[in-house]
Amino acid sequence: MTPPLPRPRAGIVGTGGIANAHAEALLAAGAELAVAVDIDSGRAAAFAEKWGINATAPTLADAAAAGLDLVAICTPPSSHAPLALEALALGLNVVLEKPPALSLLQMQELEAAARASGRQVSCIFQHRFGSGARKLAALQESGALGSPLTGYCNTLWFRDQDYFDVPWRGKWDVEGGGPTMGHGIHQFDLLLHLWGPWQEVTAFAGRLARRTETEDVSTAIVRFESGALSTVINSVISPRETSQLRLDYENATVELEHLYGYDDAHWRFTPAPGKEHLAAAWADGQPVTPSGHAAQYAHIVAALSAGTPLPVPPADAYRTMELAAAIYASAIGGSTVRRGEITDGNPFFDRADGNLEPWKLEKSTA
């Protein structure tokens, strides 16, 4: 177990757009920003100046000399797992931006490396940590809501063609997939966090409106071990952008609608007839914590400071990544996929498209 760290010293690896969210959240949680790491020295220097970081470095190995406790990996997705493995080998704890890896094979490698190194990995799934989700989880655990029955989980976003024309976007080798892997994963992670293990999935996906190697939309029907059923849509071709979660229990319907992050005002609680008393349990008057990087980093830094396990380790994030893999396997293979079915030897274990290159763009003859 990681020894207690009164004020963890953190490095930011990759200083692009999402790195700003990590820097802000780390500072808010009480960590010290010690070094900015980027192969582009100018970009690293500008980022360091913005966030009051005294040192920059071109590589993780150079950064480790600064005496770090934690690194936040904010680079493009294909480098997430390799950099995390390198950081663990250097004796550093790791926070991984989504997706934490490109395959289930890489997820297992991360889990094994963390165990062998004695260090820890926390995967960014920040929607779990808003007060609304935590309140719902507690109510659900109490049994007051009854059994989960049915619902939906929609990530309906809009990305134009210019977004996909960035060289590393929309590539299986770099992003590991389209909106299923890179956009909707946060929303269906929250669904799985609340409703527990999924059992089987039947899915469809396609490239309907964008020039990209990957899908631009997927739709799935998921059955949970509890018997509950939910649909899951992941889209980047939806002009009215929204993120939606609807969870129907025996005794209440709980809904969430937001875009990229929520607070308690984005939730709606509707008790079933005869269960109106549950409304008081929902309106509990407790402090509001918005979802987001700050909410998760508060738990990460507190755990490091106390020497306790970091939230969302690879083993916990695995079932979310496994659902993403299963959506691709079902959509591409045309069959229902059960949890636990995608293992070593399955074509979707080490690559989200199963090396089948679905929806691959035809080379232009112009």
Image (spheres, rainbow, N blue to C red):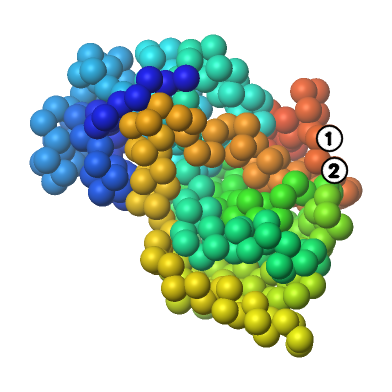
Residue 361 or 351: which is nearer the viewer? Answer: 351
Cα distance, mark 2 to mark 1? 6 Å
Q: Is residue 354 above or below residue 89?
A: below
Task: Quickly name the residue at label 1.
Answer: 341
Residue 55 or 172: which is nearer the viewer? Answer: 55
At x 44%, y 41%, the residue is 97
Judged from the image, the secondary structure of the residue bearing numbered disc 1 is loop
Residue reaching furthest to the bottom = 273
Determine whether, in the image, residue 265 is placed left or right of residue 331.
Answer: left
Residue reaching furthest to the right = 335
Give the numbered dot on residue 338. 2
To which quarter of the image does residue 262 belong?
Answer: bottom left
The amino acid sitting under disc 1 is Glu
Q: Is residue 70 above or below residue 319?
A: above
Determine whether, in the image, residue 336 is placed left or right of residue 173.
Answer: right
Q: Are marks 2 and 1 in contact (CB under 8 Å)?
A: yes
Judged from the image, the secondary structure of the residue bearing numbered disc 2 is strand
